[in-house]
Amino acid sequence: MSTEQYSVYVAQDRVNAIFTDAMGRMYGLVALGIVTTGAAIWVGDMLGVGNVIFSFGWIGMLVMFGIMFGTLMGANAVVSRGNTGLGTVLYLGFTGLAGFFLSPILMRFTTGTIGMAFILTAGMFVAMSVVGMTTKRDLSKLGPMLIFGLIGVVIVSLINILLLGSGLLFLLINIVLLPIFLGLTVWETKQMKELAQDAAMRGDARVANQVAVIGSIGLYLNALNIFIILLNLLGFASDD
């Protein structure tokens, strides 16, 4: 084997190592975020944190949403600037806040419903991620379409919450939201894969690490929303 050929093989090994590390880090952070949320749900239930928040009504919910949104935007901002360490801390802080927020909501559901929603969420999330990692199709147009659809559904949801209060419309909203977040999981997985591959090809482990953290935030949000949607659908079915 010539020196030139050996260099090519070494370079390819480095590309593979950077890419594999980025993908492993991304899914590891998603898993860690889910564990953090679960722990926060337990702590929130023990301390009644969620009940305190909801005791202030809409004001408490808006303040909580504001803190969560600010934490999430802060995580994205600092990671984009290259500070993946602080971004990871903020991301995990957000997942903890999400757990506090969910703790009183889960009290409305049975343990069986929660367990079934979690199992279905895990299965769907893994399946969609596999599709995103393996598909050869160009999904560049899929993301914007799904995001526009999501915005439309959110607007309808707000109208229903503030004005209509329709249970049937609530059910239909969740039915529509499920494929949107499943599609976003496929799209974001493929997008993060391509960005990580590009960074790996350039030998840029720092950028690949940024991709891993940003990707974990998006995928965690998708998994969380899929879980909440399935809870709503299963809860609606059990009420019937």
Image: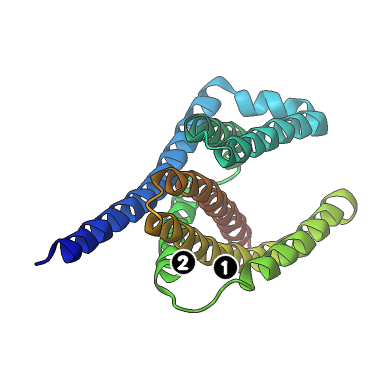
| Picture layout, residue 218 above or below residue 54 | below
Question: Residue 229: which numbered mark, if any?
Answer: none
Q: Residue furthest left?
A: 1
Front one among 16 and 123: 16
Quadrant location of the N terminus? bottom left
| Kind of residue at disc 2 | Met
SS under mark 2: helix
Q: Is residue 165 visible?
A: no
Query: What number is the disc on residue 128?
Result: 2
Residue 180 seen anywhere in this rendered image of the structure? yes
Residue at the extreme front: 3
Q: Amino acid at mark 1?
A: Gly
Q: Camera-side residue: 53 or 7?
A: 7
Q: Earlier in the sequence, mark 1 or mark 2?
A: 2
In screen coordinates, is 194 left or right of 11? right
Instruction: Determine contact: label 1, label 2, CB under 8 Å.
Output: yes
Q: Residue 116 in the image: x percent, y percent?
A: 45, 55
* 167 versus 79 height, above or below: below
